[in-house]
Image (spheres, rainbow, N blue to C red):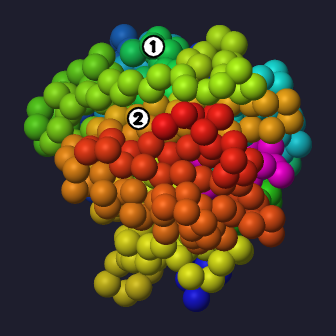
Amino acid sequence: MYRAALLAALLVLAGCQAPSAGPSAASPVHETTGTDAPEPTATPTSVDTDDGPPDPETDRIGWENGYWHNESLDVTNSDGLNESEREAVVARSMARVESVREREFDETVPVSVIDRSTYRNRSTPASNATSARFDNGKFEALFLIGEDRDALAAQNAALSQSVLGYYSPARDEIVIVADSETPQLDGEATLAHELVHALQDQQFDLTNGTVTTRDAYQGRNGIVEGDASFVERRYTANCGATWSCLDSADSTQSGGGDSHFGLNFLQFFPYSDGPGFVEHRYEAGGWAAVDAAFADRPDGATEVIYPEQYPEWEPATVSLPDRSNDEWERVRPPGRADYAVVGQSAIAASLAYTVTDDYEDASVVRARDVINFEADGKVDGDDPYNYDVPAARGWAGGKLFVYENGERSGYVWRTRWTNESEAAEFASTWSAVVRHWGGEETEENVWTIGEDSPFTDAVRIERSGATVTVVDAPDAAALEAVHDA
């Protein structure tokens, strides 16, 4: 009963994201409990003025390129914004971001417009066959993308369905995705969000510090997207009170594409939990404490989900010896880590996907376990997804190897948990995930998944103390060949 409502909510919650489906050295930053916005520091006035005070003698917070943060603009969003109108709106929005974030832009942020087909072409990074096989194995292990689909293509399809704009550190510009040279803006929310990314890049260098695993990627983006979303909410809270904002455009620019709830749940993590992490930092020490988190970014999703554990928490080092026979070979993608680390946010996404997938009506978790509903039954737009799922809670570290034998594939995934009880809960719940996707226990701790499932294979799940090891192979006879227990 929840499927239609949850998938419809994705179009509202997906916001604006950049063309990147996972961690890489050149990944552009993803794009779009707030509190009352701080008093503007740029001018003594608090309502829009027609022309604004005189320009300052030198650049200052709250003024950019001839526009004050509370200055009126003679532009109409409903008929689209031409280049000169966009320049005025961007300049004023830069001044507004400065007044909220209390930091100064070093230089003007250019804004370009591309159509959606160009965006889709640009958002598909080059990938070699080895990297593709590695990513396919990783997302198969999470029961998010089956062997019959390309993992990178599926991620990009999910990501591109409602992107309205993004900031690219590689290009040092904001890109608006629209099918018109005079696009409408969705009010000023997306623009404010992307301008925060530009400010972050100028002040903290977003290209500094490569992440090589999914969980590290989620931790880094927790501060990057959390800061942008936190400022965006404070910015828009001023609309109609401290300053006037553009009217929202007609919501007709969604990009179509696949509505894959599991992937969206995974990709949305930094936008859902990141703002809470930043708010926790802000309440502890103001913007200085937020700034410090850019120098010491969260090590993984855990510190974003539980900000009180930052910065002491670190993922445990997990030993995973290669016990495959000579017929099986590790897949080692070039230029990146040859193992995967998928943490609590990814495990939660796997569980959440069972609520809406087409394969099986029954789910491993309930919708209210992974969706934050408000009292009126609507999804909480500020914090829609819950990643603190009991079966994923207590993840302390992990490592995943992908193997191949000709056209055949397999994987070994080992996770460490805070205690034996947490490990036992995960092992039991992951067995339920295997059963959900058609697995039948054919011997102790071994399941065979039928050919009608997108995840047809054999899976072995074993727990030893606080460690759980999952082995996958094309059939039960090959499990020992992939990883001799």
The residue identified by callout 1 is 209
Query: Residue 379 location in percent, x, y?
Result: 44, 74
Asked which secondary structure carries label 1, the reply is: loop
Marks 1 and 2, the one that precedes in the sequence = 1
Q: Percent from the top left, x then y, of residue 360?
A: 65, 78
Percent position (x, y) of residue 451?
Answer: 80, 65
Q: Nearer the viewer, residue 273 or 55?
A: 273
Q: Is residue 126 left or right of residue 276?
A: right
Q: Which residues are magenta?
A: 141-152
Residue placed at 71% from the left, 27% from the top? 328
Residue 70 in view, yes or no:
no
Residue 354 visible:
yes
Picture residue at 49% right of the left edge, 37% below the top: 485
Relative to 420, say whether 428 is above or below.
below
Density class for disc 2 (Cα within 10 Å; few <14, some 14-19, many ≥20) is: many
Report the number of numbered marks.
2
Q: Amino acid at mark 1?
A: Gly
Prevailing secondary structure class for the magenta stretch in the rendered image: loop
Q: Is residue 211 magenta?
A: no
Rendered image quadrant of residue 136: top right
